[in-house]
Amino acid sequence: MSKAKFNGKEYDLSKGKDRNQYWTDYAADKLVGKIITKVEYLSSKEAKDIYWYKRPLAMQLNDGTWIYPMQDDEGNDGGAIAYGEKDTFPVLGVEDE
């Protein structure tokens, strides 16, 4: 790993603590204060266009950005979202539309 700069701060990404702080700060910069303005599941066409078999819940933020969970960092498929301690928004199959 290497070093990274974000908002004037330098992080040593070879160190777990710095890596954790970098990604926390990065996510906070992108998400804190945003408002979810729309929710919908990816369509079957959208999922198939990116070679997914599952359709996750997608959320549009007030800046127009869409966010949605993925199975892994490589984006191999859609993922579920935990909501609180007892609920989950499931993924739907491309055939469920």
Image (spheres, rainbow, N blue to C red):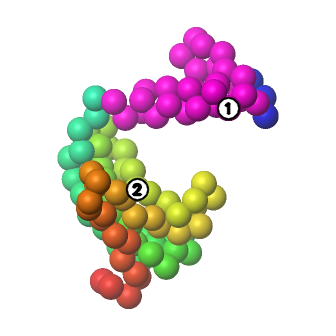
Q: Residue drawn at (28%, 34%), measured in percent from left and top?
A: 34
Q: Nearer the viewer, mark 2 or mark 1?
A: 1
The extreme bottom residue here reads: 95
List the residue tagged with mark 1. 16
Residue 28: within the magenta?
Answer: yes
Q: Residue drawn at (36%, 77%), measured in percent from left and top?
A: 92
- The answer to whether residue 36 is left or right of residue 24 is left
For the residue carrying disc 2, how many other residues have a C-alpha within 10 Å: few (<14), some (14-19), or many (20+)? Answer: some
Q: Residue drawn at (49%, 60%), measured in percent from left and top?
A: 70
| Whether residue 37 is situated above or below residue 21 in the rendered picture | below
Q: Which mark is residue 68?
A: 2
What is the three-letter code of the residue carrying label 2? Answer: Tyr
Residue 55 visible in the shown view: yes
| Whether residue 79 is situated above or below residue 65 in the rendered picture | below
- The answer to whether residue 82 is left or right of residue 1 is left
First in residue order: circle 2 vs circle 1: 1
Separation of disc 2 and disc 1 at Cα?
A: 25 Å
Quadrant of the drawing holding the N terminus: top right
Picture coordinates of residue 91, whole percent (x, y): 38, 71
- Magenta residues (range): 4-32
The extreme front residue here reads: 85
Foreground residue among 26 and 65 = 26
The extreme top residue here reads: 8
Q: Residue drawn at (33%, 85%), measured in percent from left and top?
A: 96
Element type at mark 2: loop
